[in-house]
Image: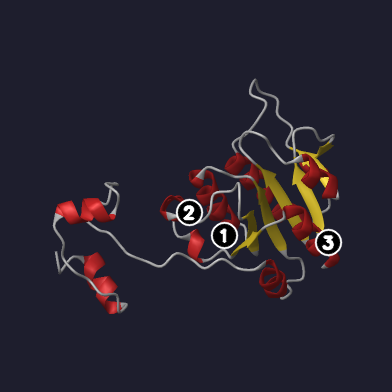
Amino acid sequence: MLRDPLVLEAKQLGIDVSVKEDRELDSLSGRGNHQGFVCLAKAPELWTLKALIQAAKAKEKPLLVILDGIEDPANLGAILRSCDAFGVDGVIIKNTGNVTLNATVAKVSTGAVAYVPVASVSNLSQALSELQDAGYWIVASDGSATQSYDEVDYNAPIGLIVGSEGFGVSKLVLQRSDFIVKIPMVGHVNSLNASVAAGILLSQILINRKK
């Protein structure tokens, strides 16, 4: 065990390693599928909105993702993974009615939780106003929209709103948005998983900015 490549690499990185019985690993992992290894790590620190906006100023066209009521940790983890893949500068979540960073989020994100800054706010509408004052255009994704997601010019600072799995973007948040867009669908199912929708929208923004 102590000569396992993963153990040797951990030691080279200065990570303390100790050998435990399987029952201890079961307890530490909440009886998850630990495969013989458990890593204890500090939860990522949440940012303030002001700090997130300030850090994103280094980019000519910063891109922030705003989550309105995402409750499934697997969805949040998958969204963070897409955010890292598409170069998003940060994610904004509500500190109530929204899942926060936890072990499931970290696992599903496959490490992206360590690279994508996440800010927590108490009032999403107020946060949108602050973003707009900082020069951001707010784009909300909602099935009620008449405009397609590929009809917007994203070559500007953008705050992209993705709504909850069951209720979408709240009415007040939609009213605060500069654009409301939808992803046209031609199949029999009229909605997409929140993380899938986020990935599609982020991909389109990246494509649009390369034109």
Q: Where is 95 relative to 32, above or below?
A: below
Q: Nearer the viewer, residue 184 or 158?
A: 158
* Mark nearer the N terminus (1 vs 2): 1
- Badge 2 crowding class, 10 Å Cα cut-off, few under 14, some 14 to 19, many 20 or more, is many
- Amino acid marked by disc 3: Gln
Image quarter of the C terminus: bottom right
Give the structural element (helix, strand or loop) at label 2.
Answer: loop
- Amino acid marked by disc 2: Ser
Residue labelled with disc 1: 84
Of labels 1 and 3, the one closer to you: 3
- Badge 1 crowding class, 10 Å Cα cut-off, few under 14, some 14 to 19, many 20 or more, is many
Q: Nearer the viewer, residue 77 or 174?
A: 174
* Mark nearer the N terminus (1 vs 3): 1
Q: Quadrant of residue 37?
A: bottom left
Q: Quadrant of residue 65?
A: bottom right
Does the CB distance between marks 1 and 2 fall below 8 Å?
yes
Residue labelled with disc 2: 109
Distance of mark 2 from mark 3, alpha carbons? 29 Å
Looking at the rendered structure, which numbered label has been put on residue 202? none
Instruction: State the image coordinates of residue 71 (x, y, percent, origin top left).
Output: 56, 43
Distance of mark 1 from mark 3, alpha carbons? 23 Å
